[in-house]
Structures are given as C-alpha cells and as structure tokens.
Image (tube, grey):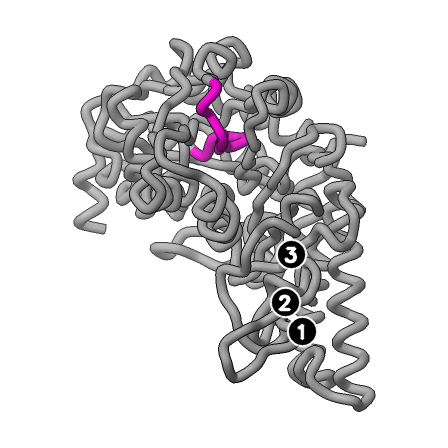
C-alpha cells in the first residue's frame, strides 16, 4: 500500500501547529537525528502523568500494579516488533546506553589481551568509543572492515577481516551518514562460524525496515525510541538469552537484585530485570508502545518503500541543480548526504535554515569516515513517513541557490 504522507501529518501536532523556522513553514529533513511524535504517543505520556502516576515494582497497590502491566505490555510490543522473546528485551536510555551495556557488561568481562574487536570506519561514535575503552581495559586490539569504493560493508570484506582472534564484531545495520544497508544475516553466519559475537547498531534500521532478530541471528541489537516516533531517553537492547545471562549489569541498584548482604555479596534477578536498576524511564517505555503500534499500523514495508522512492527522487532533483556533490547516490536508506559546491557544510545548513529547511550538517558523530569521504563535513537530509516530494523540491530549490548562502546572514 502506498502511504499518504499528507494524510499522516494530521496525526502530528508539529505539523498541525504549522511550526515555522526563520518565519518559513518548517521542512523537517533531520529524521535520522530524531522524529516527530504522533498524538497517540503524547497522549500516552500525558495519561501517565495526569491519571496513572506510580513507580514500577515498588508498591502493592493498584496504580503500581497497573504500571507494571503496562511496562510488560510495552516489552511484549517491542518483542513482537523485532521477533524476539519478551525476556530478551531490555529497556535502556537509547542506542548509546545499549551498546555501552554490551561493551562493559559483556565484552569487558570476556575479552582478554590479544583478542580483536572488529569495527568499521563508518560507525557512529556510540559504536566506536565504548569499544575503544574496552580495548584499553582488556588489551584487546581494534581492527576495521575495509569499506568498498562506495562506502559499503560487504560480506567479502568482513570475511577477509575475521581472524581466529576476532571475538566481537560491532557494525551498524544502516550507516547514519551514507545509509548503506549491511548484509547482517550473511555477516552473522560467518561471524558464528568464526565463533565471534555480532553486535548490531540498529538505530537507523529498526525505524525504517523490517528487522527480525531471529532471522538475522544477530547476538545483540540496539535501537532508540526517539528515532521511531517514540519519546527521547528510552531505547532497547535485544540480546540472546544465553548472552544476557553472561552479561553483568552496567548499573546496579534497587530493582535489579534478588538479595544482597552486608559482607558485599549480591545475587541479581534474571534478564531483563537484571539490567533495569533504579526507577525506569516509565513515560518513555509507555510511549514506546503506541509509537511502535503506529508504525505497524502504517506498515514498515510501506514506510521503507516510501523512503526509497523519496531517496531516488531527491537524488534526481539534487543532481539536476548541478550545484552539489552527492556522496551516497546508490545507498538504500532514506538518507542523502551531500555538499553544495564551494560551500562549507555548516554554512550550507545555515542557508537552508533561512528557508525553513532543517538538515544536519557536520561530521554526524562519524568522524573517522571523513578521511574516506575526502571532506571535513557534509550536509545530511533524512526522510520518514511524513516526508513529501514537496519537501524535497524545496530542498533542491535551495541547493540550486546555495552559493548565495551569505544572504542568510542578512535576512
């Protein structure tokens, strides 16, 4: 079914309120950074604070019990969405928190000197910096899968990069700058033949394409709520139960332990409670459920098809300006990364801002990728289910006049 982005905008107050930027109607093209929230998500959060406020697992009264049940319902919704077992869904602060949990709760515990952690130069800082620290703590070695000439991660290059010492492979399923989709299922197979653990950053994949963890056979998967229409400050770590049992809590406190004694011994609850110490981000967890249900109602396949159509249209329109270089023309995700000829990326974004267009500029938290791209910074336009071709027309028109960016400072 072909989705109707104009009709969908009726469900989003950011559009109904006709939000403007620099006095112009807002053209939101920064969805890879964060997404707007539909009414159903906002209503669920308001309901919690206005009608249902209580802590979870902290009381023997109706309000607390009701919140416990709603958190369980949200966990079941996530599990259905990614095809995991309910007990394999851990609520975290986001993709960053999830990857850090794997890095310091599992990898730092199991790696030893001389082991290898295999990454790529296209990774977001959240999937690099924790591994840098783990390597420092354990004496493990960092290695990188070579990107092909376009910037893709290929099965062949992963195969060539694996060694008997490779214990962890940490890769994004979809790169946040170039938007190439990595062949995770095939990579998982060769990782497991090599007795390596595959950690997948799903921040840019889970909101935009069908992700089935059992089909992929990945060992860990992380993603954030705010990139899939949900609240900020909540995310998910999926892990195979056998690995979650081996993983230590990254944070300890109330709610994740079974017993502890004054001499310093402690026993922890089973996953996922083992990793959910302290008061959870209850509003975030409750808001995540209607966000996912909204995506399921629209259809993840429909969203993916819409973004692919927009991507092709954007490339066509931007190339027609003859005023920019595109770095990821053939990538699959709804991300176009470009520079206006002769204009520094941040200056270009400032000019776009003067026309009401919100794009990300800079290094996109993927600073190692700059050497591969041969440029210090880029502009990124990213799409979602409510993005229209008219949005892209406005972007292309602005890019066509991009060398006039200095005018932006005088508007």
Magenta residues, start to end: 164-176
Alpha carbon separation for disc pair 3 and 1: 17 Å
Cβ–Cβ under 8 Å for marks 1 and 2: yes
In the foreground, 19 or 137 = 137
Alpha carbon separation for disc pair 1 and 2: 5 Å
Most extreme residue toward the bottom is 61
Q: Residue at x 64, y 56 (%)?
A: 90
Count neighbours of disc 1 (C-alpha within 10 A) and say few if under 14, some if 14 to 19, many if 20 or more.
few
Count neighbours of disc 3 (C-alpha within 10 A) and say few if under 14, some if 14 to 19, many if 20 or more.
many
Earlier in the chain: of badge 2 and badge 3, it is: 3
Residue position marked by numbered label 2 in the rendering:
268
Count neighbours of disc 2 (C-alpha within 10 A) and say few if under 14, some if 14 to 19, many if 20 or more.
some
In terms of image quadrants, where is residue 117?
top left
Earlier in the chain: of badge 3 and badge 1, it is: 3
Residue position marked by numbered label 1 in the rendering:
258
Say above or below: 76 vs 397.
below
Residue position marked by numbered label 3 in the rendering:
90
In terms of secondary structure, where does tag 3 sit? strand
């Amino acid at each position: 079914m072909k989705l109707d982005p104009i009709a969908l905008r009726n469900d989003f107050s950011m559009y109904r309120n006709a939000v403007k930027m620099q006095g112009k109607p807002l053209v939101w093209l920064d969805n890879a950074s964060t997404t707007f929230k539909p009414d159903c998500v906002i209503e669920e959060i308001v309901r919690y604070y206005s009608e249902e406020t209580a802590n979870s697992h902290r009381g023997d009264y109706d309000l607390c019990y009701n919140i416990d049940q709603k958190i369980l319902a949200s966990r079941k919704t996530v599990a259905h969405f990614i095809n995991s077992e309910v007990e394999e869904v851990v609520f975290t602060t986001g993709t960053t928190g999830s990857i850090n949990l794997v890095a310091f709760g599992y990898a730092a515990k199991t790696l030893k000197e001389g082991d290898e952690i295999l990454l790529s130069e296209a990774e977001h800082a959240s999937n690099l910096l924790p591994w840098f620290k783990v390597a420092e703590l354990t004496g493990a070695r960092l290695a990188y899968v070579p990107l092909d000439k376009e910037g893709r991660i290929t099965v062949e290059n992963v195969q060539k990069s694996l060694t008997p010492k490779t214990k962890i492979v940490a890769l994004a399923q979809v790169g946040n700058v170039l938007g190439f989709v990595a062949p995770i299922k095939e990579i998982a197979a060769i990782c497991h033949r090599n007795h390596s653990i595959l950690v997948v950053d799903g921040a840019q994949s889970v909101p935009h394409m069908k992700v089935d963890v059992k089909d992929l056979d990945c060992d860990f998967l992380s993603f954030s709520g705010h990139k899939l229409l949900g609240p900020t400050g909540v995310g998910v770590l999926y892990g195979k139960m056998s690995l979650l049992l081996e993983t230590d809590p990254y944070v300890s406190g109330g709610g994740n332990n079974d017993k502890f004694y004054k001499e310093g011994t402690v026993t922890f609850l089973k996953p996922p409670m083992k990793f959910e110490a302290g008061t959870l981000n209850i509003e975030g967890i409750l808001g995540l459920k209607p966000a996912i249900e909204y995506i399921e109602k629209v259809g993840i396949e429909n969203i993916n098809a819409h973004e692919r159509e927009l991507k092709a249209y954007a490339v066509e329109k931007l190339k027609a300006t003859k005023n920019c270089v595109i770095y990821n023309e053939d990538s699959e995700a709804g991300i176009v990364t470009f520079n206006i000829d002769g204009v520094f990326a941040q200056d270009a974004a400032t000019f776009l801002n003067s026309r009401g267009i919100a794009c990300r500029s800079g290094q996109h938290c993927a600073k190692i990728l700059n050497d591969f791209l041969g440029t210090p910074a880029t502009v990124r336009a990213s799409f979602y289910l409510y993005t229209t071709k008219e949005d892209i027309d406005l972007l292309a028109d602005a890019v066509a006049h991009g060398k006039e960016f200095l005018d932006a400072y005088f508007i």
